[in-house]
Image (spheres, rainbow, N blue to C red):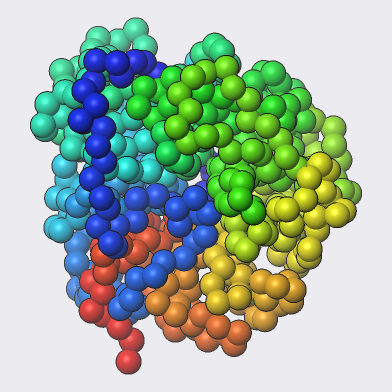
Amino acid sequence: MICRIAPLLMACLCAAAWITSPLRAGDQPQWGQKHTRNMISDEKGVADDFTSGAEAKGVKWTARLGSITYATPIVAEGKVLVGTNNRHPRDDRHQGDRGVLMCFNEADGKFLWQLMVPKLKSVKYGDWHYCGISSSPVAEGSRVYVASNRCEVLCLDINGLADGNAGPYRDEGQHMAAPGKAAFKPLNTDADIIWRFDMKAAPVGAVPHNATNCSILVDGDLLYVSTANGVEWTHRKVANPKAPSIVVLNKKSGKLVAVDDANIGPDIFHCQWSSATLGKVGDKKQIFFGGGDGLCYGFEALAPSLATGGNTLKTIWKFTCDTTAHKVPGGASSYPKAPDSPTVIVSMPVFYKNRVYVAAGGDPWHGKRLGGLYCIDATKRGDITKSGRIWSYMGLGQSISTVSIKDGLVYIASYAGQIHCLDAETGKLQWSHDTEGQIYGSTMVVDGKVYVGTGVRRKGDLWIFAAGKKKKVIRQIRLDAVIHSTPTVANGTLYVATGETLYAVDGGRKSK
């Protein structure tokens, strides 16, 4: 299960409120690079030497989170946002397990506001214990988009309710309460919901399994969202095989614009936990998606200004990542950890020079321990399982991580804790390193270094390697808890979220 480890109208909102202010040069408003999701950054002077604990050195500020944090922090408009759980409540009115999105001041870590979401109890195993909000949000101007633990897409005001209720959604108090419970009185430290789209409701009808895990893709006026549709609690069948795997929403109104035509639902082995990415192939944009059926898909991107509903996200190509795996749907947990157990894709595909790089393999919690990294030719059409394979690297093992591609090299982490560096052109292994810890997040390449977080038995380490064809370990930093997310860099500051603490590290601390 992914958690064990990583609409409503806007007609009355004036158009001026939707003019998005330009991002500061160093903001990091989403997980990975814009559109392509490549886990790299152009920042310079990034810290690689700091300590935590009572005598912390090089740490700008820290902020208390929950007990488990799967989401990667983002930074935009002077705010830092990260999803977590409610193990350490900041509001005494909200006790017990909840999904939480916290917002902090970028300069000093001051807590500003939080989105509080009750557990989804109507779907058994649909919102696993203490997962919290595991989806990384995305920010654009004054708006934040996030998939909550209740399988809904929310548009939020980045300033929370401190500057008033922007509307048109006005039921924040009831949204914070469990169904059938009395509404809370919204405070200035609560989230301001602009609109809400429930993916469980008709016409989508998604049934999430374990966790709604999606980093939303923004392209123009459109949002591409994975529905997290999956098997029901017995793992014997897909709860709603007719539900789409991707929905496209209008970012201003939350209205449904399109669904995919891939019909992935009947063949889902466990759930849909990948996220959509985008790249331009020739003169046409494509949407790339890792399916819960073990296939990677390329779709025709919609016109970014499309506003009307009833459209279809059309499949251009599909690539079977593992032709030897069982193709009988019904949940990966139904199968033993054998070489021919089902293949799934949890990582995000990354687009680079007309190629798509995606990690696929056995579900980390069920199924085989084998897995591979695939390099796919995105210029092909149809079933490109044979014609589109440029290379594959089968020494990876299970992986739920997204690749980093920089200077002709690919960096990828396995679930078992190995870091692999490969030639992007040929797939030839350059080096590997065993961190001896599990890896749920992804590598981040920045300032000539590779950062990655690990964790095992309540201990977490931030590993830092030199980027390049020769292996060099720069530092291994022990932190307070397991690291499930990906390190983030913005405006000269390194952000690392452990399960319990968000660290903002001053860029001045560099190794000698």
Snapshot quadrant of residue 9: top left
Say whether residue 142 is left or right of residue 221. Answer: left
Residue 159 spot, x, y in % from top left: 18, 37
Q: In this view, does 286 lie above or below 422?
A: above
Near-viewer residue (439 or 391): 391
Tell me: 188 left or right of 3: left
Give coordinates of residue 298: x percent, y percent.
68, 43
Above or below 238: residue 348 = below
Label tally: 0
| Extreme residue in the front direction | 283
Q: Residue 401: x and y, percent?
A: 58, 56
Q: Quadrant of the N terminus?
A: top right
- Give the residue at x 55% y 28%: 247
Report the residue at 25% width, 50% height from top.
22
**In this picture, residue 510 sits left or right of residue 233:** left
Residue 362 lies left or right of residue 2; in this view the side is right
List the single residue furthest toward the bottom: 512
Where is the C terminus found, in terms of image quarters?
bottom left
Q: Which residue is drawn at 10% across and 31% down?
A: 163
Is residue 17 in view from this perspective?
A: yes
Residue 442 place in picture, x, y as percent: 52, 60
Residue at 41% across, 33% down: 221
Q: Nearer the viewer, residue 321 or 284?
A: 284
Q: Is residue 464 visible?
A: no
